[in-house]
Image (spheres, rainbow, N blue to C red):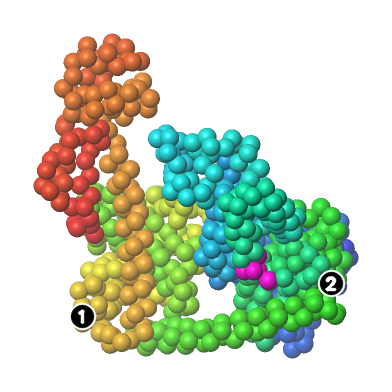
Amino acid sequence: MADPSSYRPKPGQIPDSPGVYKFRDEHGRVIYVGKAKSLRQRLANYFQDLAGLHPRTRTMVTTAASVEWTVVTTEVEALQLEYSWIKEFDPRFNVKYRDDKSYPYLAVTLNEEFPRVQVMRGAKKKGVRYFGPYAHAWAIRETVDLMLRVFPVRTCSAGVFKRSAQIGRPCLLGYIGKCSAPCVGRISAEEHRELAEEFCDFMAGRTGAYLRRLERGMQEAAEEMEYERAARLRDDIGALKRAMEKSAVVLADATDADLIAVAEDELEAAVQIFHVRGGRVRGQRGWVTDKVEAVTTGGLVEHALQQLYGEERGDAVPKEVLVPALPEPVEPVAQWLSQRRGSQVSLRIPQRGDKKDLMATVGRNAQQALALHKTKRASDLTTRSRALEEIAEALGLDSVPLRIECFDISHLQGEDVVASMVVFEDGLVRKSEYRRFQIKGFEGQDDVRSMHEVIGRRFKRYLQEKQKSGEWTEEPDVGTAAPVDGVLTAAGEPDRADGRPVDDDGRPKRFAYPPQLVVVDGGAPQVAAARRALDELGIDDVAVCGLAKRLEEVWLPTEDDPVVLPRSSEGLYLLQRVRDEAHRFAITYQRNKRSKRLKSSPLDAVPGLGDSRRQALLKHFGSLKKLRAATVDEICEVPGVGRKTAETVAAALAGAAPSAPAVNTATGEIIEDDGAPPAALSAERGQER
């Protein structure tokens, strides 16, 4: 625990101007980001007597080892920079709202020639019109199904659309009148786009004028005794009214507003948002967060506004935002919202009438969400805590293993040997910390030697980063550990061979944090190899165990007999989850490597032969086997292939050994060679490790 006075800035160093500040821990990680109208006054509050600080603030300042700041011109700039840094560094002591799921939107792809109506999740795309979010995808599909009768916009995928255009026949929706079938030219691209824009206008709340137009058309058809057309328009009006009934009118003046309510206790807070467009509730979403910093209701609202509108522009930010408490100060936040919308945004607390009543409804939803979350969380926390305590007791650890790393080796009959490292923190997966390795120290199948190499490389990197940060004052004794070349991140990017951290600016480093427990997939030999690798590096404060699949027994490096946990043990269940996740991650990486290798062809090595001519050769002859049997003159018949290239191809194929024939495992028949070495993947996967 650090003493805040050890890194307190000297008097007069801190400017008396707006800015954003960052607290870092001893490893250089950014642990808290804040903004202030006056940096001098705000930072002085953190360096007062520890007894006078809020418990969470006291924990933060004693965890930190340094503080730094950036001066800006206005409070609005400070708000923008604070949001950017929180998103970039993910500080552990900042309030961060996280969706418990990815909410679905009704999207209209106006960026395409023939716009498509579909359900979309995830990040928003440019040129796509979004409506929602909705609580369930089926609610979107029910609404769309009703509206396609009146607005028969395309809903099919690009593949279906292209196929229908090729064969000249629309899909089923085109035949039953729920698609205008632009794929076969029933309407032009301009007419279809106009139809999609009418669909968007109706969804945006401009419903009255369109319904009145349909009613006039129905009356005119009836007067002209065109009863079939009148009946069709009557049914269209009924379908639109049923679609409108799914989102009841809550504000009579066709208001566009977002209502945000907060329910909180000492430890957690729940936020609920109702999106009202055209006076109707068009979407709902909610978040729950831990209150890891001392924050008021106004502060929670400010964080929620940053989360909601930090990536939004234009009409996605409504004219009116109603909240239970205003941020302090409110002017910079309101100005920031107005800048993102491009026009004035009203940020206020509703005082009376329908808006106050609706805010009370949103508040009740927030209270229910918090109560439901606490019920689930209590069960989860109890289970995870019990699992970690059982593991600590069974393995004889001094404390519960808050960080567990598990390693697994995967290969196919000694080829494409890879390894995985998965991380569990507090009993939960931490996928951003996952790593994968290529075994390069030797060739062939040797799980024990592979495990020794991987453990050595991982912890050698840990010692190098520890030495770089100044925590290690002497040159570590790395023994015979393998080099670190070939380490890959979870994204597959090669690590730097000099052992330097990828980022020195507070972002998570790859191998900087040691686990309390290392789990290996295997028995006594793998455990002994892992322990030997740690001993060679002089690391004696990391526990090691192995989990063997045969009887699910736990092996320790100092014991001749395994530790057998009860089958009903939560600790055993957690170890199984860790082991199975490492196996999944390793085998996925190994399959990807193998599939890339199997897609190679002898034609790839022919100099001067690009993709186009390679495809032309295979298309002309039908298979690599027939191309290998062809003469130089026959190869010259392929368009674009000259005699010199044909001779080179023939020579390359003559020198390449023909691959073994692929066999259909279901029928036993030999499959014709199609230009790439056959995989017979279904047979191989039974031999994967």
Label 1 vs 2, first from the N-terminus: 2
Choose mark 1 or mark 2, whichever is in front: 2
Amino acid identity at mark 1: Asp
The reply to whether residue 27 is in sight is no
Which of the labelled discs sits on residue 560, or is there none? 1
Amino acid identity at mark 2: Arg
Does 327 lie within the magenta span?
no
| Quadrant of the snapshot with the N terminus | bottom right
**From the viewer's perspective, is 237 left or right of 161?**
right
Q: Residues within 10 Å of mark 2 (few under 14, many from 20)?
A: some
Q: Residue at x 20, y 47 (%)?
A: 680
The reply to whether residue 189 is in sight is yes
Based on the displayed image, in which of its 4 quarters is residue 392 positioned? bottom left
Where's residue 676, x and y in %? 25, 36
Against 498, residue 303 (above or below) is below
Q: Residue at x 36, y 67 (%)?
A: 581
Secondary structure mostly taken by the magenta-highlighted segment of the chain? loop
Q: Nearer the viewer, residue 647 or 422?
A: 647
Q: Which residue is mark 2?
A: 348
Where's residue 618, x and y in %? 28, 27
The region drawn magenta spans 244-248
| Quadrant of the snapshot with the C terminus | bottom left
Q: Nearer the viewer, residue 21 or 426?
A: 426
**From the viewer's perspective, is 6 left or right of 445?**
right
Q: Disc 1, disc 2: CB below 8 Å? A: no
